[in-house]
Amino acid sequence: MAINILNLIVLTLTLGAVVWYTVITRRMQKAIVDQVGELVRQRRLSNMPAFVADIKHREGADYLELTNIGKGIAVNIAIDRVEVRFPTLKPGNIEFDKVLMLPSGEKVLVESREFIFGQAEGGDPNSLTFLGRHAHYDADVSIRFQDVEGTKYIQTLRMGKSGYEHGFVRLDENGK
């Protein structure tokens, strides 16, 4: 009888030790997962491109000048179509050329074409006055790009009547 009681006490203590070990191991596992997630985020930030934009007038045409102020190389840069709302004319849109690559600290002039709604081909060289200080409204300019690891990002800048507003870079969830 005393041996059975002693066995029961030893088994109960063993069960308690196993449960305690499981709880501590789970906490350690969660801490490691959190640390790895933070390391991935820090590495991504160290390689993430980011842009500022300006309008430059050269040789009779306006260009959108993108400057990569981030720490990494931006690749496959595409600017979403921007809607133009003229005060007295039919609305239209601006389509920008794509840029293959832009290293950190460098600038590129991006050409654009203006299309009146319903127009399918061609387009006219654009004077990007709708993005400048003399515009009648504010326009959102969304820039989609990737870093060298293939992570897709989007950054939306606001340009126009109210001036320039720098947008934050965020992950491109839908990866257009």
Image (cartoon, grey):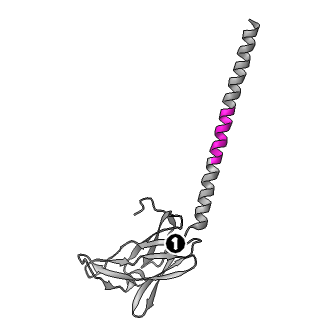
| Left or right relative to 51: residue 87 | left
Residue 145: percent from left, percent from top: 47, 69
| Left or right relative to 46: residue 112 | left
Residue at 51%, 66% (x, y): give it.
169
* Residue 19 higher or lower than 80, as above or below: above
Residue at 46%, 87% (x, y): give it.
56
Residue under circle 1? Answer: 74
Badge 1, how many Cα within 10 Å: few under 14, some, many 20+?
A: many
State which quadrant residue 105 falls in: bottom right
Residue 15: percent from left, percent from top: 68, 24
Residue 1: percent from left, percent from top: 74, 5
* Residue 20 higher or lower than 168, as above or below: above
Residue at 67%, 38% (x, y): give it.
25
State which quadrant residue 121 falls in: bottom left
Q: Which residues are magenta?
A: 21-32
Magenta residue check for 31: yes
* Residue 124 higher or lower than 156, as above or below: below
Total marks shown come to 1
Residue type, label 1? Ala
Q: Secondary structure at mark 1?
A: strand
Residue 66: percent from left, percent from top: 49, 79
Q: Please, which residue is most extreme toward the bottom here?
A: 59
- Main secondary structure type of the part rendered in magenta: helix
